Amino acid sequence: MKQTAKRLPSPPADASMWVDEFGDSLYRYALSRLRDPEAAEDVVQQTFLAGLEHHDQFSGVGSRQGWLMGILKRKIIDFIRQRNRVSPLDGLEVPDPWDSFFDRNGSWKKNVRETLLEPLDAVDRKEFWPIFQTCLGNLPQRQAGAFMLREVEGLESAEICKELEISASNLWVLLHRARLRLANCIKTRWLQENE
């Protein structure tokens, strides 16, 4: 018997322009989520390949960029899930900064909550985001991944648990630790910047 090669559908006419038109914005989005230039490049390349392979599924209702962004989001989730499988115990040995924000009863210490929740004016916002990105980059990968999926991507807990293949209580611990570490890091760096 003669084997026939799998025939891929022919690419759309505008596919050669995708990298020029959408590459930068997809890369920036991936980099902001993964904080790793090499990983961001990989997921963007995977996105373009998936787009070429499944271009016939593009309905034309939205924009081509929006469709590719949807594929990219799935590729980022897949990457985070795979990365978490590789390093399941990452960051668990780091002490919890619980004591710096909460009292023995689990309530916020005096003035901590108000300080963290103060609204930022325009000047402070410009200073805040670089500090936030640095602090996010210092989180263990599992915590950062869970935080990004929950707080930035807006996924529900059940979706995140399914994607990362973890229990709800494990997710709660990851998010709790990520939020505490972020708050502690941001507060420390913010004070350093303002001194």
Image (tube, rainbow, N blue to C red):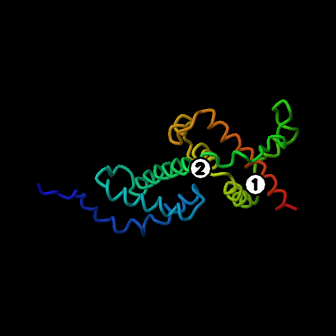
Quadrant location of the C terminus? bottom right
Quadrant location of the N terminus? bottom left
In this view, which residue lies farthest toward the front?
1
- Compared to residue 158, the image places residue 23 above or below, namely below
Q: Amino acid at mark 1?
A: Asp
Q: Which numbered mark, 1 or 2, is in the foreground of this view?
A: 2
- Compared to residue 66, the image places residue 92 above or below, namely above
Q: Residue at x 52, y 47 (%)?
A: 81
Residue 6 percent location from the top left of the image: 22, 56
Residue 64 falls in image quadrant: bottom left
Give the class, few, some or many, for how many residues have Cα within 10 Å of label 2's Cα (few <14, many ≥20). Answer: few
Q: Earlier in the sequence, mark 1 or mark 2?
A: 2
User: Residue at label 2?
Assistant: 87
- Compared to residue 151, the image places residue 43 above or below, namely below
Q: Residue at x 37, y 60 (%)?
A: 49
Residue 133 percent location from the top left of the image: 67, 58
How many numbered callouts? 2
Image-based side of 84 in relation to 13, left or right: right
Image-based side of 185 in relation to 6, left or right: right
Query: In front: 56, or 145?
Result: 145
Residue 149 percent location from the top left of the image: 57, 45
Q: Residue at x 84, y 60 (%)?
A: 192
Q: Which mark is residue 182?
A: none
Residue 73 percent location from the top left of the image: 48, 51
Q: Amino acid at mark 2?
A: Ser
User: Residue at label 1?
Assistant: 121
* Element type at mark 1: loop
Distance CA(mark 1)–CA(mark 2): 39 Å
In this view, which residue lies farthest toward the left?
1
